[in-house]
Image: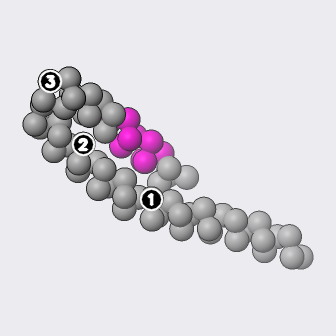
């Protein structure tokens, strides 16, 4: 699932940038972390839809 892979990638970037903010007060890292957090928020919606679509495939198979 592409959305989950992208979420993982963005969370890793957020983690790195957050460390830079906490340890060094890096303002640019703060902007990147918040931007990535917003992107994750939107991707979560896509991820939820993907999960529902996947489970519906199995529900269709089980009913036959």
Quadrant of res 38: bottom left
Residue 29 x %, y %: 17, 36
**Helix, strand or loop status at disc 2:** helix
Magenta stretch contains residue 10: yes
* Residue ID at (23%, 50%): 35
Q: Which residue is mark 3?
A: 24
> Which quadrant of the view contains residue 43?
bottom left
Q: Earlier in the sequence, mark 2 or mark 3?
A: 3
Estimate how packed mark 1 is, as few (under 14), some (14 to 19) or many (20 or more) residues with alpha carbons within 10 Å.
some
Could you tell me what secondary structure mostly forms the magenta stretch? helix
Residue 53 located left or right of residue 42: right
Nearest the eye: 61 or 38: 38
Give me the residue at 36% from left, 62% from top.
42
Q: Choose mark 2 or mark 3, whichever is in front.
A: 3
Which percent across, then down, holds residue 34?
Answer: 23, 48
Q: What secondary structure is found at the residue carrying circle 3? A: helix
Q: Earlier in the sequence, mark 1 or mark 2?
A: 2
Label 1 or label 3, whichever comes before in sequence order: 3
Mark 1 vs mark 3, CA separation in Å: 30 Å
Question: Mark 1: which secondary structure?
Answer: helix
**Neighbour class for label 3 at 10 Å: few (<14), some, many (≥20)?**
few
| Crowd class of label 2 (few under 14; some 14 to 19; many from 20; radius 10 Å) | many
Q: Is residue 24 above or below residue 48?
A: above
Query: Residue 64 sits in which quadrant?
Result: bottom right
Q: Which residues are magenta?
A: 5-13
């Amino acid at each position: 699932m592409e959305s989950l892979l992208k979420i993982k990638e963005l969370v890793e970037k957020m983690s790195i940038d957050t460390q830079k903010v906490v340890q060094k007060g890096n303002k640019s890292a703060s902007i990147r972390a918040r931007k990535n957090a917003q992107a994750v928020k939107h991707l979560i919606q896509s991820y939820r839809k993907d999960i529902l679509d996947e489970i519906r495939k199995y529900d269709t198979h089980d009913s036959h």
